[in-house]
Image (cartoon, rainbow, N blue to C red):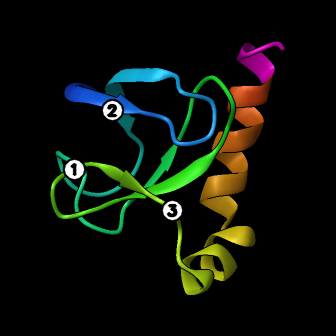
């Protein structure tokens, strides 16, 4: 998993300031439509063409709901982040 700096991104759910990300799957940088999981609250968003976070579309919500990769990452996040 490669970690990379990101321009300041604000989680739309909790307001967490995201300044870096880890690319779990795919290319070397986030692409439009790639899913983001907030490290602090676990909120799922998607990157837009400008590398900003946007809400998931209905189709994206359905697609990620049972995605084993997203479930695995959420479980790993829950083990290290305590409320």
State whether residue 81 appears in this view.
yes
Identify the residue shown where x is 22% and y is 60%: 31
Residue that badge 3 annotates: 55
Residue that badge 2 annotates: 9
* Image quarter of residue 46: bottom left
Q: Are marks 1 and 2 in contact (CB under 8 Å)?
A: yes
Identify the residue shown where x is 15% and y is 55%: 50
State whether residue 1 appears in this view.
no
Q: Quadrant of the C terminus?
A: top right
Of residues 12 and 20, the one drawn nearer to the viewer in this rendering: 12
User: Looking at the image, is mark 3 or mark 2 earlier in the sequence?
Assistant: 2
Residue 16 included in the magenta stretch of the image:
no
Identify the residue shown where x is 69% and y is 63%: 68
Q: CA distance from mark 1 to mark 2?
A: 9 Å
Magenta region, residue range? 79-83
Element type at marker 3? loop
Q: Is residue 11 above or below residue 32?
A: above
């Amino acid at each position: 998993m490669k970690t990379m700096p990101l321009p300041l991104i604000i989680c739309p759910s909790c307001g967490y300031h995201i300044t870096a990300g880890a690319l779990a799957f795919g290319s070397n940088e986030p692409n439009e439509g790639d899913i983001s999981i907030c490290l602090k609250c676990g909120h799922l968003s998607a990157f837009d063409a400008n590398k900003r976070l946007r809400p998931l579309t209905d189709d994206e919500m359905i697609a990620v709901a049972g995605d084993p990769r997203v479930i695995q990452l959420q479980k790993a996040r829950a083990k290290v982040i305590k409320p």
